[in-house]
Amino acid sequence: MSTPHLEHTFATDLPELVMLWSAEESPSPQLLVLNEPLAVELGLDVDWLRSPEGIEFLLGHGEGTVAMAYSGHQFGQFSPQLGDGRALLLGEILTPGGSRRDLHIKGSGPTPFSRGGDGRGALGPMLREYLVSEAMHALGMPTTRSLAVLSTGRKIQRGRVVPGAVLVRVADSHIRIGTMQYTRLKDDTPGLAGRLAEHVRLRHYPEVDNALELFTAIMDSQVATVAAWMRLGFIHGVMNTDNTTLSGETIDYGPCAFMDSYDPATVYSSIDTQGRYAYRNQPAILGWNFARLAESMLPLFTPDGDDDAGLSAAREAMETFPERWEKAKTRELSRALDIPTSATDVIEGYESLLLAHSPDLTRFHRGLVNAADGDETILRELIPAEDLDPWLARWRDHHPDAATLAKIHPLYIPRNHLVEEALDAATDGDLDPFHKLISAVTNPFDEQLSLVRYAHPAPEDFGPYRTFCGT
């Protein structure tokens, strides 16, 4: 097989938003993990990807690779120029199914956007993104995906000396709110924001007709994604505007984690000292991010240049955000309970149980599966009878179906203690725990006796958990 054909429509349509750049050479590259089912889905030859030529392709040593430019609000502070500081867009691949997917690599060395960093990736964080993104895909979340992780043969300094690595990522696109923000800084480039909006419309939302419809379509897409996260207890950890895609996909799995015990105040990220991106704050932050997108798209809302009308249109669109969020949240919780969205007393009772007793969220949900089939053992381990029984009676009035619930409530998620165990072992040269964990979390609904330990929360001696933004 020859090198796969990649297209470069983003770079061609929007040259102001990219910089032609090449990945640095790797002294002794090795393919550590290859997502063979995804490779087949993309129309790539698995054997060829494992060859020396395939490895060079995955490392970004081809033509047309670019670093993407974007801005971003990071923890509320605006950074005019961020961009791909250690990443490159290889191009776009047309799959046998007819879709267009980005191929993108992280850890490929410094770029003009590196801001003094070395542009390299450490093995642990690259494997973390592979693990969590593929788990999220298996759980039905809109997400970027991971095709491969390669070691570079280089040792890098990250607190201690660790192996260097590159992640190969796949996405519908890597266009972010921060990309649109960047266009506002390029006032000397007439029409750039409009061209970006049209590129996004044609690529992701061809059914809409204008910029305002595009804005609300993007909002609905991201609202649905975050509501689905929260049903699972997922905390992104760094919901900056440069980490919010216009496609609606989840992107950048740095300090992310899943809750064990339910607590809306949970924060895992070591750099989120004020709790800006705590679990309970994710809806409000998403709304804040969309206000920034609205500001960036303001001139596009009224083509005739009427600024007052554009501001009014943006304000009206943003005023719909709370209602859109509540509908998405209610839809997800009704799915979680297999009841109608109109059963608000049962939904509110469910939320009250979680708040009052902080159960392990994943086990509680699996307990619902069993309880719908008559086995209340797990629920009674987690919730006192005096609170559980009245709620159970109301829930059962709606005849929830165990088989339906079993398809959305996982047995296995990337439990924090298991993730750390797998990444520590991999950093020390043993990938076996990683392979066992990835097998479990990419088959999250399939019960297997050999995977019992993967279905339980961390032992008490695991202690407080902190994550770090290593990707």
Image: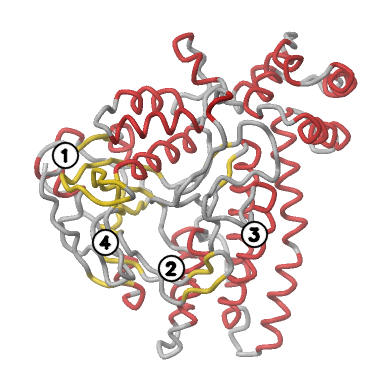
For the residues labelled 1 and 4, the Cα–Cα distance comes to 20 Å
Q: Quadrant of residue 62?
A: bottom left
Q: Secondary structure at mark 2?
A: helix
Q: Quadrant of residue 199?
A: bottom left
For the residues labelled 2 and 1, the Cα–Cα distance comes to 36 Å
**In the drawing, does residue 262 fall left or right of residue 455?**
right
Q: Residues within 10 Å of mark 2 (few under 14, many from 20)?
A: some
Q: What label sits on residue 199 in the rendered view?
A: 2
Q: Comparing marks 2 and 1, which lies closer to the viewer? A: 1
Q: Secondary structure at mark 1?
A: strand
Disc nearer the start of the sequence (2/1): 1
Residue 198 placed where, x, y %? 47, 71
For disc 4, the marked residue is 118
Q: Nearer the viewer, residue 34 or 116?
A: 116
Disc nearer the start of the sequence (1/4): 1
Give, as a three-letter code, the residue at label 4.
Asp
Contact flag, marks 2 and 1 (Cβ < 8 Å)? no
Q: What label sits on residue 30 in the rendered view?
A: 1
For disc 3, the marked residue is 285
Contact flag, marks 1 and 3 (Cβ < 8 Å)? no
**In the drawing, does residue 22 fall left or right of residue 160?**
left
Residue drawn at x 68%, y 53% as measured from the top left: 281
